Amino acid sequence: MRVIRGLPEVADAPVALTIGNFDGVHRGHQAMLSRLTEAADDLGLVPAVLTFDPHPREFFGPDTAPPRLSTLRAKFERFAALGVDRVHIVRFNAEIAGLSPRVFIDEILVRRLHVRWLLVGEDFRFGKGRAGDLATLRAGARSFSVEAMAAVHVAGERASSTAVRSALASGDFDHARTLLGGPFTITGRVAHGAKLGRSLGFPTANIALRRAPPLTGVFAVRVHGLGDAPRTGVASLGVRPTVAAGGTPLLEVFIFDFDAPIYGRRVSVEFVHKLRDEVRYPDLAALTRQIHADVAAAQDYFAGAH
C-alpha cells in the first residue's frame, strides 16, 4: 500500500475513493472499506482513501477534541489488511478548511485525485463551514459517481468512534471489542524509562504516548510481539500522579514471568479487563503495596478461565 503525504498536482490513475478520519477503524469503517475495495475491483479502479491529519476537530478545537483511538501507523496497517492500495494523508490547515465545496470537488477530487467513484457516509459534510453535503456532492459530480453508505449498527448501537471511546472509558472491553471487531490495543516501541518499577521489584516495559489515550487506569493485559503466544501482565496507563507532577501519558506493563531485554521492540498491548482507576498514593511504600495487589488481581483474573 502506498502512503502519499499531500496531494499530487495531477493524478496518475483514476481511483475509487472514500474520505474520512477512520479513527479506530471500527466495524462501520470496515464495512466502508470493504465496499470501497469491492467497487474498485468491479470498476477496474485503484481503491484509495483520503484522510486528514490533524483531524479537523483537533484543528478547530485542540483542547476539546476527543482522544484518538489509533495511531496513524496502526490505522494504515488496518487499511492495508482490508485491501486499500493507496492512502492520501493531507495536512488539515486553514487553506484546506477554507475551500468551498465547489473548489473541493473540482480541485481536490477531480483534478488532483481523478476520482471516478466516491463513497461517503450518509451524513458526510465538507467544505468551508461544512457547507457541502451529499446533495452538494451529487450535484457537482459530473465526472464521477457518488454512493452513500448508511450507518452500521452493532448490537443495537451505531458503530462509531464515539461509541468505542465511551465503552473504553467505562471499562466495557467486551462492548468495545464488539464495536471494533477485535480487541482494543495500543502498539509502540519499548523505551527506556526511569527504572522506578525495577527498583520497586516490578520491572516494566514502557511505551511513551504522543497523545492522551482514550482510557486511563490499571488493567489486566495481554502483550503481543514477544513470541508465538501473547504474554499476560498488568499495565498502568496514565500520568503516574504518585511519582510525577504534571506528567505526560505513559503506558507501563509488568509482564508476568518474563525478564528479557526488549528495548526497541515493537509490541502490542491488548486491554482485557480494568482493575481500577489511577490514584495518587502518599508515598512509594503505599504504591508498592498497591502494585502487589494489582498483580495478584490480574493473575486471579487470568486464572479464572478468561
Image: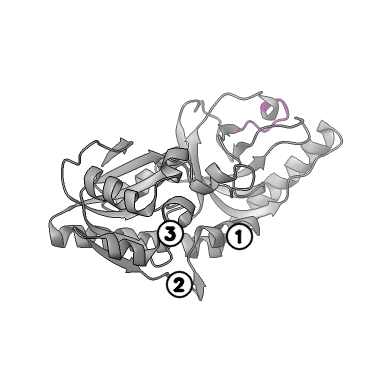
Q: Earlier in the sequence, mark 3 or mark 2?
A: 3
Residue 225 in sight in this render? no
Q: Earlier in the sequence, mark 3 or mark 1?
A: 3
Amino acid identity at mark 2: His
> What residue is drawn where x is 15% and y is 45%?
13
Q: Position of residue 213 (x, y in %)?
A: 59, 44
Q: Position of residue 126 (x, y in %)?
A: 41, 55
Q: Is residue 298 left or right of residue 287?
A: left
Q: Which residue is mark 3?
A: 125
Q: Position of residue 38 (x, y in %)?
A: 22, 62
Between 289 and 20, the one lying in front of the other is 20
Amino acid identity at mark 1: Ser
Between 229 and 110, the one lying in front of the other is 110
> What residue is drawn where x is 64% and y is 36%?
249
Mark 3 and mark 1: Cα distance apart in space: 24 Å
Q: Check the picture and name the quadrant holding the C terminus.
A: bottom right
> What residue is drawn where x is 40% and y is 63%?
133
Q: Earlier in the sequence, mark 1 or mark 2?
A: 2
> What residue is drawn where x is 21% and y is 60%?
142
Q: Is residue 27 above or below residue 194?
A: below
Does the residue at mark 1 contact the one at mark 2 (Cβ under 8 Å)?
Answer: no
Q: Which residue is mark 2?
A: 153
| In magenta stretch: residue 43 | no
Please name which of the two marks, 3 or 1, marks the residue nearer to the observer.
3
**Picture quadrant of residue 247:** top right
- The part of the chain drawn in magenta is 198-204
Q: Which residue is mark 1?
A: 166
